[in-house]
Image (tube, grey):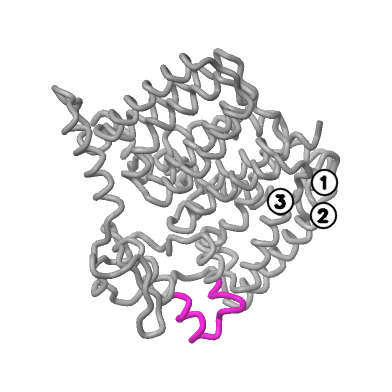
Amino acid sequence: MTKISQLIYSSFIKSTFFILLLFSFIFSRSFLGIYIFGFRVGEYLMAFALVLFVFTLFFKFENNPLNLLNSKVRLGLTLLFIFFIITFVYSNSQLTDTYSYKTSTYIWSLSFLFLGMSSKEIKLNKSGIQIFQILIIFVYVISIYGYPEGLIDFTLQISDKYELHKGSDLALFYIISIVVINRNLSYTFEGFKYLCINSSLFLPLLLFKSRSAFVACFILFIYEFYKCLRNSTFQKKQALVLLGTSICLLTISTYLTQNKAIPEEINIDLISKSYSSLSEYRLKHYQQDYPLFYFEDGRVFSGDGNLNWRLIMWQDAITDNIDDNKLLLGIGYKEMFNVFKVDNTGYGNDRRGIDKLNEQVHNYFVTILLRGGIFQLIIVLFILYNILNSISLNESKTSLGIFMFAVLFISCFDSSMENSHFPLLFYYFLGNFYLVKKRT
């Protein structure tokens, strides 16, 4: 087992994985869709995640990253695997059907945590941070203007789709970037400058792309802002210059996210219109006479169109499981949810999407409930809670809690955790940021 563990956790594997992680960071879903010998990069990563999960959980070897976690995490992971087998057999899912593993990625993706914990903690010097900042600006610009047509055509030739960073992807990128820079600069004024500048650029873009992503990132921003203020020392002049720069960038970003073109003339009316139009676009209800949440005929609805679409779908899907007596163990892994099989165009938006490929209910925890039942949902919550409890220091636990909350909040309104790149990045950096230090 020692030789196998040395191979799985070898420097070559971790270096290769980090390169793949970096490309996922920059190119998001488009990179994970690249075909190699008939399978996509994301499918290879999830296959590796399954092997990593089973091997790390059930075999003893030196420097097993599980030993650094609360013993209850191992118990939770073991129970999760056992109930996966029970649900798998109960639902007549097929071992030879790749769809069974595609629909159970919420289990296997947890193993990216182990790879993050077993890798060296990410350290950036001043030059490294500057290069990283260039990467941040690059992603910001591409998210607004996209790639050149030639690169798009090339991507479509080698990948299953071309897709820019979605709101959830940008949010995770922002969260990881902010934490990386501040941790490496020890929350000094230098890190505070990066925080203010990057937040001024990204927060309007996030609000334009996704409200849940904006809320999650704004909460993280407030916490990181507080930590920087508490640990930094700076002069009033520096603060005023930074404040002025941040307001200018915030205004420019608010305008660019909606118009893309730089205005010929900037005046008060233009600034006011940019802020008000962004607020109206993202914060108003499509049904003005209805509140954000309301009850009718024993169900929950919303005056907000996007949220209402999700609420109806979640409740329909859960009702299907209850009616089929599958609430405890779930529907398993061999078929899509019934809410995607029935005619639902009456809701004003086909749940399968424009390309008819969507199979996700846009909620991480509802997905677990539907696939694996109440038992698996409780176990996953138990695992996440005890990962948080693996940290002893209150301040570190708070930082980890904010990080986990921000990402999981986004995943309550998006299909992000059902992709391969999003949980890959989340769990890897969760282990590397907050749990790797337990080894030192």
As drawn, 136 above or below 116:
above
Q: Is residue 303 left or right of residue 243?
A: left
Q: Are marks 1 and 2 in contact (CB under 8 Å)?
A: no
Q: Secondary structure at mark 2?
A: helix
As drawn, 262 above or below 218:
above
Dot 1, crowdedness within 10 Å: few (<14), some or many (≥20)? few
Q: Is residue 327 magenta?
A: yes
Along the viewing direction, whichever of 381 and 290 lies nearer the viewer: 290
Q: Is residue 390 left or right of residue 272?
A: right
Residue 384 percent coordinates (x, y): 66, 55
Numbered circle sitting on residue 67: 1
Who's the residue at 38% across and 78% down the image?
A: 295
Along the viewing direction, whichever of 434 and 55 lies nearer the viewer: 434
Q: Is residue 175 left or right of residue 288?
A: right
First to last magenta residue range: 317-332
Q: Secondary structure at mark 3?
A: helix
Q: Is residue 111 magenta?
A: no
Q: Which residue is mark 3?
A: 387
Query: Amino acid type of disc 3?
Result: Ile
Query: Amino acid type of disc 1?
Result: Asn
Who's the residue at 47% across and 22% down the image?
A: 133
Q: Find residue 315 and report its image quarter.
A: bottom left
